[in-house]
């Protein structure tokens, strides 16, 4: 008998499973942080989590609201200054995977967290780049997780804050000393990977019960599906228990502050 | 040696209209009490530098102190937008502000370069990003040894940097603990610096590798108890995540924001916590 779970839980568990035990992961706040900590609390106890606030090898008991919550520092092996974090640990090549969220993503996995509309007269001003532009190029590879919607998955982003594969899919060609870039995108509907040649995102796995039409309806370009389309494995009871406990603990802690 | 001043006098002496000011603290140790004092003294036309403007700059922008903001991530962490920043950028209220945006890596390097007395910072950055197309302070140079194309940004050299820290001793030496951000770099990069602290102690009890900023490298030290609230001071008090969430509703509307400013900053008579806790 299959378990009851939400599409958000499916997304988080799938994103968590992408991390392998022993990897060093530079973690973005929000969904990536939730997934990375679930990985650490389940199949990947030795995963090394790094946050841009300078907290190295951190093991938070509750999910941080901000990238610099005290919990991250208190549970870290050590905390370094922010310039050291970006220069030695990220740019120095010590990070296997960068785990990012975004407001907008396009077919070549370029990320926009800067604005919607025109730069001089934005319709919506978003927070900006933060750590993402260099995480995406200096980490060995990049995982991206966000909810699937037509607003978020657009053919061309309004602004390339952070490089996926560029406006033509060739943005990383012949650039020395950078990482592979996005290797998977995990949503609440499916998993996508870049086509090895064109770098356009292709659906490789549908979550249980999700149809191709749902993905097509929630994607702003003519999305392709892999020939060997797989079904994403369901979460197990242990993963769901640990995720729910983590979220309940987090909610209690934040409400009490 | 650092001079011990009241917060009022430190701000009055070192923050001039039109100055370039960096108030640093990466989520932790954000100098809110000092920011509120800048608002109360109605400083104008400031160029405000900060990696994460956070709600401290949302308040300064909404209060009309800012002419320009240089930043790398302008949100309310874990909550959403900075509505006063957005209102200024999108609608020009209370006045139009200029923005110059970077990535975190570039700004961190720029603070470090400023502390090191260099004119520029070099990094492997902005590859494929469109930020260089909207920020003319991002350039690319060729490594003279390898030929690699690298990004260059001007160093940050503020007129005054303001930070908050746990404590100072009676000589004005300051100990910063926990998430240390770019605070030491900000102080050393600036012409003048003001450090607010939770308390003055006889002995810092710092271990040999602790982040200690010598008093002779600081212009002024001022006591501001709970001076980082609603952000936090490691070892003293926690972050008010609740206030960060409440700020979303306060700042969304010009009238509720103006009322909040009246009640908690203008009429707060130098209450360092600004009545926010």
Image (cartoon, helix red, strand yellow):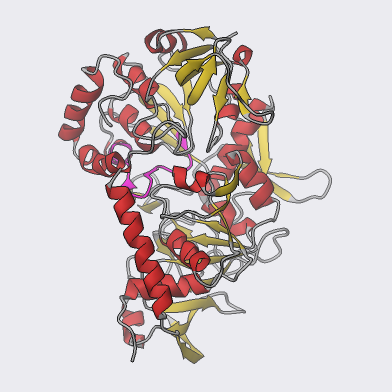
Q: Residue furthest right?
A: B145
Q: Quadrant of residue B277?
A: top left
Q: Is residue B216 above or below residue A207?
A: above
x and y, in percent, of residue A34 in the image: 43, 62
| Residue B77 sits inside the magenta stretch | yes
Q: How many marks?
A: 0
Question: Which residue is drawn at the image coordinates 33% and 84% (left, top)?
Answer: A3
Query: Does residue B37 show up magenta in the picture?
Result: no
Q: Determine whether, in the image, residue B14 is placed left or right of residue B249.
A: right
What residue range appears in magenta? B70-87
Where in the figure is residue A54, as x and y percent of width and height? 57, 44
In the figure, is residue B275 to the left or right of A168? left
**What residue do we see at 61% from left, 54% from top?**
B127
* Figure check: B215 above or below B99: above
Q: Is residue B160 visible?
A: no
Quadrant the N terminus of chain B occupies: top right
Q: Is residue A130 left or right of residue B34?
A: right
Whole-percent x and y of residue B133? 52, 47
**Which is nearer the eye, A214 or A87?**
A87
Residue A31 is at least partly visible in this image: yes
Q: Quadrant of residue B273?
A: top left
Q: Residue A110 at what x, y percent from top left? A: 50, 63
Residue at image point 77% right, 45% down: B143
- On screen, residue A253 versus residue B217, left or right, reads left
């Amino acid at each position: 008998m299959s378990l009851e779970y939400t599409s958000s839980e499916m997304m988080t568990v799938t994103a968590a499973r992408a991390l392998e035990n022993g990897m060093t992961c530079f973690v973005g706040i929000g969904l990536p942080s939730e997934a990375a900590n679930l990985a650490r609390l389940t199949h990947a106890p030795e995963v090394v989590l790094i946050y841009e606030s300078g907290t190295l090898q951190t093991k938070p008991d509750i999910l941080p609201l901000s990238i610099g919550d005290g919990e991250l520092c208190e549970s870290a092996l050590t905390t370094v200054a922010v310039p050291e974090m970006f220069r030695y640990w990220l740019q120095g090549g010590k990070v296997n995977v960068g785990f990012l969220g975004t407001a907008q993503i396009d077919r070549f996995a370029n990320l926009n967290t800067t604005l919607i509309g025109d730069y001089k007269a934005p319709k919506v001003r978003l927070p900006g780049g933060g750590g993402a532009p260099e995480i995406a190029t200096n980490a060995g590879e990049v995982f991206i997780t966000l909810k699937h919607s037509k607003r978020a998955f657009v053919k061309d982003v309004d602004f390339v804050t952070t490089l996926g594969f560029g406006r033509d899919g060739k943005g990383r060609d012949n650039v020395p000393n950078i990482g592979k870039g996005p290797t998977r995108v995990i949503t609440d509907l499916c998993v996508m990977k870049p086509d090895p040649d064109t770098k356009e995102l292709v659906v490789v796995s549908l979550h249980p019960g999700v149809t191709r039409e749902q993905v097509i309806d929630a994607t702003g370009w003519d999305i392709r599906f892999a020939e060997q389309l797989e079904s994403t494995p369901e979460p197990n009871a242990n993963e769901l228990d640990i995720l729910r406990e983590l979220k309940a603990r987090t909610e209690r802690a934040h409400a009490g502050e | 040696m650092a001079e011990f001043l009241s917060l009022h006098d430190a701000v009055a002496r070192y923050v001039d209209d039109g100055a370039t000011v960096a108030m640093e603290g990466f989520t932790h140790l954000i100098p809110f009490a000092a920011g509120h004092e800048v608002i109360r003294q109605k400083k104008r036309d400031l160029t405000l530098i900060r990696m994460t403007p956070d709600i401290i700059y949302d308040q300064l922008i909404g209060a009309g102190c800012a002419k320009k903001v240089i930043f790398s991530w302008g949100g309310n962490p874990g909550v959403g937008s900075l509505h006063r920043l957005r209102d200024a950028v999108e609608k020009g209220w209370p006045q139009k502000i200029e923005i110059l945006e970077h990535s975190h890596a570039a700004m961190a390097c720029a603070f470090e370069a400023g502390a090191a007395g260099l004119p520029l910072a070099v990094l492997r950055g902005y590859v494929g990003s469109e930020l260089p197309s909207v920020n003319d302070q991002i350039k690319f140079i060729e490594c003279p040894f390898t030929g690699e194309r690298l990004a260059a940004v001007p160093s940050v050299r503020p007129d005054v940097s303001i930070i908050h820290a746990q404590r100072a001793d009676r000589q004005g030496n300051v100990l910063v603990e926990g998430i240390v951000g770019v605070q030491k770099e900000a102080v050393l990069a600036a012409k003048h610096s003001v450090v607010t602290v939770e308390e003055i102690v006889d002995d810092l009890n710092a271990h040999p590798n602790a982040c200690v900023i010598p008093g002779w490298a600081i212009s002024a030290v001022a006591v501001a108890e709970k001076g980082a609230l609603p952000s936090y001071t490691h070892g003293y008090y926690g972050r008010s995540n609740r206030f960060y969430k409440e700020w979303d509703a306060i700042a969304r509307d010009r009238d509720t924001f103006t009322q909040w400013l009246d009640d908690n900053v203008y009429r707060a008579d130098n209450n360092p916590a600004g009545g926010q806790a």
